[in-house]
Structure formats: C-alpha cells, structure tokens
Amino acid sequence: MTAPLPSKSLWRIACLCTLRSRRWERCYTIMKLRSDPVYAAVTQELAGSTLPVLDIGCGIGLLAFYLRESGYAAPIVGFDYDPKKIACAQSMVARSDYGGLGFMTGDARQGLPECNGHAVILDILQFFTLAEQTALLSTVAAHVSPGGKLIIRTCLRDDSRRFRITVAGDWLAKLTFWMKGSPVCYPTRELFETVLGGAGLKVRVQPLWGGTPFNNHLIVAERA
C-alpha cells in the first residue's frame, strides 16, 4: 500500500482554503486527508500511469490535489453537481501552482465530460437509483482507455453493523447539508461484476475500511 502523504503535503493542500469564508473547509480538508485511506489507495492504483483522470463527484477536488502532491502529472478533470463545491475547487486551483486541473459543474446522469483514460467515483453511488447506477457505470466504462482503470469507493449493501453505521453517516451528511441528496440505493458486488465485466473490464473488489467504521470497499475495473 502506498504510504500516506507527509503532513507538510497535506497542509499545503489544506492551506489553499485560506479565505475566512473557507475556514471550515480548511479544517475539513486536513481532517479528511489524514484519516481517509481512499486517497493513498487511489494513488497506488494510478502509480506509474500517464493517462488523464476523470473524477466524478469530485467535491472540492481533494483527490486531484492529493494526486498532484503525490507526483501524478497527467490532466485531471473534476466533475460535481454541487456548484458551491466546484467554486471552492476552482478557487483552490487559482491559489495553487498546480497545472492541468479543471473542475466543472454537471449531473453525471445527464452525461460526462470528454475525458478518456482513468475514471474515479468516490462515495456517490448510493445517491442513485439502481437503474441510474447501472446506466452510469455503463457510461463511465466507455471512458476507460486501454490500460486504464475505473476506481470506485462505495459502501456495499449487506447485513453487517458496518453497513448500518454507513447508512447513518450518509443521513447525517444530508441533515447537516454537506450532501445535497439522500441515500437511495446501496450497490452490491454483483452489480459491478455484471455491468463492468460485461463492458470488458476485469473487476476486483476489496475492503477499504482503514480506521473507519464504514462498510467501504474499493472496486477496481481495469481494461487490458
């Protein structure tokens, strides 16, 4: 597993949230980057690649900044339907010396930006219906180039205590207005194997709990 970034790199990212109105985002950023194992996991999966990355549901762009601090130099396009988060990501880019980063607002159910290479979807599938999940996965698979990967972090639906904690956390995010949508449908392992496998991608699924109580899994679908 790739080691997490050193504290000085995490602070460089967090300090991009320097305006008074962004102070809470700065605190959120440093806490999130220190505690969440997904950033190091995605960095490891992309290590050595020069393909562009499409980050669907990018939020304020933390993955893109993390990848830049890790030395990933290829273009990265962030895409999210919350205009406030995209505005924050854009302002962070403007205060940085990172190049090749672009952020735009849009609804993944209505289409995706023209960016082929790798694709990443972190923590948003539960806000889509099963039909929308199936359609999105099929659409994203077409953006994965030969040698590229679709990397997904999501909670898988099962009867575990971790699953119940994850559902409660998602509803808390909705009630505190961090997430605009409510959880609708949690995907199963079989969904990824059926849809992405049918699109010609080789799929593997592994737990990605880290030190969290959540039922998170990493799904990596690679095109040979």
Image (cartoon, grey):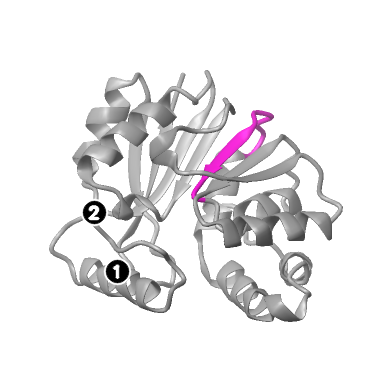
As drawn, is 184 to the left or to the right of 221?
left
- What amino acid is labelled 1 in the image? Thr
Horizontally, residue 179 falls left or right of residue 59, namely left
Can see residue 213?
no
Q: Is residue 218 above or below residue 47?
A: below
Q: Quadrant of residue 61?
A: bottom right
Which disc, if any, is residue 186? 2
Which image quadrant for residue 75? top right
* Main SS, magenta residues: loop
Q: Residue at x 57, y 25 (%)?
A: 116
Is label 1 in contact with label 2 (beta carbons under 8 Å)? yes
| Mark 2: secondary structure | loop
Mark 1 Cα-neighbour bin, 10 Å: few <14, some 14–19, many ≥20: many
Give the residue at x 35% y 34%.
137
Residue designated by label 1: 166
| Residue 195 part of the magenta segment | no
**What's the magenta region?**
47-57
Q: Is residue 147 left or right of residue 5?
A: left
- Say which label, 1 or 2, has the lower sequence index: 1
